[in-house]
Amino acid sequence: MARPAATIRRVARSESGLGTLEILGIIAMIVLFLATLPFVREAFQDIIGAVFNRRDEATGEFTAFSQMALGIFFTVGAIALFMGAGWLILSTNLGKHLAFLVTASAVFGWLTLSGVLFVVYAPRGIRPASLEGLNALQIRIPAIALALGAFILFVMFVMALDRYERDTVSD
C-alpha cells in the first residue's frame, strides 16, 4: 500500500512560487488599474510634468534637464520594449535561458549590420558646426567603434548558443 505522501510529486524550486515574469505582470496589472482612478492619474501627471515639462522662464523652451530626462526615458523604454518583447515571445517556446541567448544574438547582429551600414552610408550634406574640420573617416570613428563592439558581442552570444546546444545534446 502506497503512502499518500509518497504519491505527491515534489515541486521543483523553479516551479514554486511566483517567477519574475509573473511578478512583473501583477505589478503591470496594478499600475493599469491605478491609472483608471482619476486622482491617481492626476498625481502621476503632476509628477511626470515636474520632470519632463520644465521650461525656461525667459524663452518658454524646454530646459536641457527636461530634454535629457525625456531622451533617457525614451531610450530605456525603447530598448526594454524592443528586446523585452522579443525575449518574451521567444521564452514561451524556447525557455528563458535559450530565449535570452537568441534575443541577444539577434540584437547585436542587427546592431552590427546597422553600424556597418552607417559607416558605409554616413549622413551626407550639411554638417553641424561642431563637425567642421573633421574629415570623412573622423566622422565615422564612433560608428566604427560601436559596430566593432556589437560584432564582438554578437560573436560571443553565437558561441554561447553553440555551447548551450552542445551541452543540451550531450545530456
Image: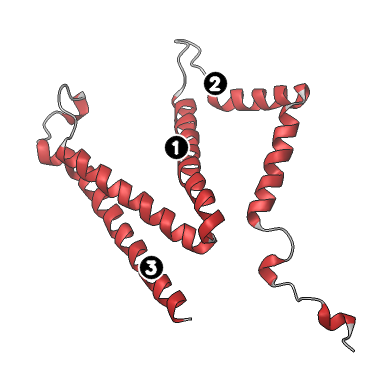
Report the number of numbered marks: 3
1 or 3: mark nearer the eye: 3
Identified at 14% across, 28% down, the residue is 132
2 or 3: mark nearer the eye: 3
Identified at 18% across, 25% down, the residue is 127
User: In terms of depth relative to the viewer, which is nearer, 147 or 55?
Assistant: 147
Secondary structure under the numbered disc 2 in the rendered image: loop
> Which x, y percent locates residue 57?
51, 12
Q: CA distance from mark 1 to mark 3?
A: 27 Å
Q: Amino acid at mark 3?
A: Ala
2 or 1: mark nearer the eye: 1
Task: Tell me, yes or no, whether the two marked residues, 2 and 1, touch with CB atoms within 8 Å.
Answer: no
User: In terms of depth relative to the viewer, which is nearer, 6 or 15?
Assistant: 6
Secondary structure under the numbered disc 3 in the rendered image: helix
The residue furthest front is: 1
Q: Amino acid at mark 1?
A: Thr
Q: CA distance from mark 2 to mark 1?
A: 18 Å
Residue under label 3, please give it: 160
Against 134, residue 43 (above or below) is above
Q: CA distance from mark 2 to mark 3?
A: 44 Å
Identified at 69% across, 51% down, the residue is 23
Residue under label 2, please give it: 53
Packing grade of label 1 (10 A; few <14, some 14-19, many >=20) is: few
> Which x, y percent locates residue 117?
21, 41
* Image quarter of the N terminus: bottom right
Q: Amino acid at mark 2?
A: Asn
